[in-house]
Image (tube, helix red, strand yellow):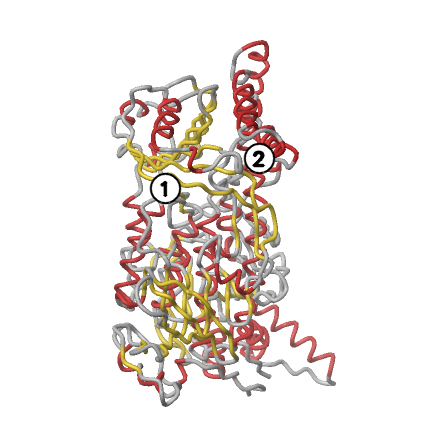
Amino acid sequence: MLKGVLHKTQSWKSCSSALTSTDFWSSASCFTDRLPQHVSVHKCPFGQQRSASSGSIQHVPVLIAGAGPTGLTLSILLGKLGIPSLVVDRSSGLPNHPQAHFINNRSMEIFRPLDGLAAEVAAHSPPLAEWRKFVYCESLTGRIFGEVDHFQGQTGPRMHDLSPEPVVHLSQHKLLPLMLHRAHRRDGQDSIRFGHQLHHFQQSPDGVICTVQPSQGSPYQVQADYLIAADGASSRVRKQLGIDMVGEAAMQHLVNIHFFSKDLWQHVKGRPAMLYFVFSSQAIVVLVAHNLQEGEMVAQVPYFPPVQSLADFPASKCRDILRKAAGLPNLEVDVRTVKTWNMSAQVAERFQDGRVFLAGDAAHRFPPAGAFGMNTGIQDAHNIAWKLAAVLNNTASPKLLDSYQVERKPVAQANTALSVANWHEAVKVPKVLGLDPRAANLLNAVVSSGPMSLLPKGFGRAALDFGLAAGLSVSGLYGPLKQWRERQLSSIFASGQTLHLQFPKEDLGFVYNTPGAAICPETDTVLSASHRCSAQPQPDSAGADATAVNTKGRAQKATQGSVGGSDRRYRPSCTPGSRLPHCTLRQLNTDGSLSGAEISTLDLVSAHKWRLLLLIRSGPWIDAWLEAAHTLETELGCPIRAVSIVASHHGAATPSRINNQALEISFDVDNSWPDLSGVSENGAVLVRPDGHVLWRCVDAARVHAINAAKEATRSSHVSITSDVHSIMTGFRAAVQPCVGKSTN
């Protein structure tokens, strides 16, 4: 019996069942009942109300401010779950200037079920040979101080033991059109509006009234159940809420020069790299090779405001800097755009205010050291999408949304700290060469200080130019410090104390286990000797280690690095809050034959339908687990998909319906699931719609025995409860964080 009544929210779902792209029109009438009599409404292409006049109000379940990677990911995910959304962005269209460019495994896993997005993104990435290294040099064609191969032992960009998806090098301005196409295909052209800025909003108990200002025309209002601020580092929404950013606002000031040079490939194809760190008396530049063969690159050049400004970097000066960085005085260079930006390390003090949520750069800003910025934003969207869908579908209480900040803020804080640590690794090489950025920043602080303003105009600029030139003149592998600097550089590169690229532990191993997270502590955490699998240490909140196994089920050499001197190993685990580990499977057909294609355990998580995933083994408790799943699905209205992962398909049960609950069978190709799951044949793993483990029962038979023993101590006769009853308590408790309903 339900003790509580599901909290009713103003939800489009209260008028109709979950929508798909084909029945948006039929659902539109449900919104009109909520509007005042004097407001006129007409249907827009994606099935919501849109203003027919300046006095009209459009209703949408979710309004997303910002059409970057975070906003578009959220729009696509919500669309897959049948939740309409509206995206507004103040820009006139997608950007042409490259920004983030490294997409990690977890983001690719999120893209994987989105209508072929992951495969298309991987297909657009340049060959790994062109971006597997970082090169530290005097110029693109000059002396090399050292180089780092970030894919040692790998012939491709995928770590097969850890993920079904590779890491990818693809610039944001090339990624966004692929995402936009899918968002348009699902929700229609009018679901994403460029040139429309969220100007103001006001919250009420029923929703958020948003005023949107188009670049042309009059402002209009949109009533949203929820507002998601994915509007970037200078978020207008965050500022209106008065939410402060905590951390360092300006670690470094840089000028970004986006350029093409078709001839450059011929000069660097013998030393291809993703990043070129150029340190010489002629130039200090980091060159990001977005596509070497096409000659598309971005140069990051330090500058020093307020003494310097963007006006000090006209196209002619930029071409001069680029030619010096290349070591090619006659290089043809096509400068496209020049922009300034501040390197920050900040996290918002809170991610939620009522019905408004911050995501992406609006919630956190990282140094570009480790590629955490865009990836963390994509994963923010992934975390909140299924929760919004559950609440708007009346599957869950709105309290579920409180877990968004609880889960994502610690990840953002951990990624900020790691990005800063990685940045400090990156500047070790220039420090050894006599090019410490802290010295340049100190010089700038002095010449731009108040007392210096009393001196004649232009003195500060002259002092800055002189100081920087003096520093450059004594830098490099020259003079009396040459041999010492060479030894220091050799030590740095030999020990791996340079900028790192791949972080499997943080990218795949982050764990949602802080108080308030939407998980349930596991049942029976200690395995008996007869059921014990390989050691399963408990992960910590930063994504710490569980057991490292490869797809053959054997222990593997852990993935590790040396940033901050910490243990960088990633060991997959089914501890509650962890990402469901990748395990290669083949599905059994109804006739007992194996399907031809291999899939991942991650593919069992449904992107197109809100439901939990119950993973069980082939032990004698299958019927009990299925009956328990069916009971809870009936009681709570919470769909549960049940899959049995078996070690052998010979003699295994075939896909069927047992106790009114459908059962699917998947064959564990490499017999790695027992180690990865950490459960006995009688145990189970329950997975959330975002692919994170909700609950784990190590051994149902042990729980049954414990319950029987407790019952015996309470009565004069032994009364052993049924198999189903013995696991229902834990099962109910596990589902409760996702639905916000309590049962007895």
Left or right for 23, reference 298: left
Q: Nearer the viewer, residue 59 or 498?
A: 59
In this rendering, the answer to whether 728 lies above or below 456 is below
Position in image of residue 582 (x %, y %): 43, 53
Position in image of residue 440 (x %, y %): 57, 29
Residue 615 visible from this viewpoint: no
Circles 2, 1 touching at the beta carbon (< 8 Å): no
Location of residue 68 (image quadrant): bottom left
Residue 460 visible from this viewpoint: yes
Position in image of residue 79 (x %, y %): 34, 68
Question: Residue tagged by mark 1?
Answer: 169
Question: Residue tagged by mark 2?
Answer: 424
Mark 1 crowd level (few <14, some 14–19, many ≥20, 10 Å Cα): many
Callout 2 amino acid: His
Element type at mark 1: strand
The residue located at (27%, 32%) in the rendering is 293
Callout 1 amino acid: His
* View extreme (bottom): residue: 37
Q: Quadrant of the C terminus?
A: bottom right
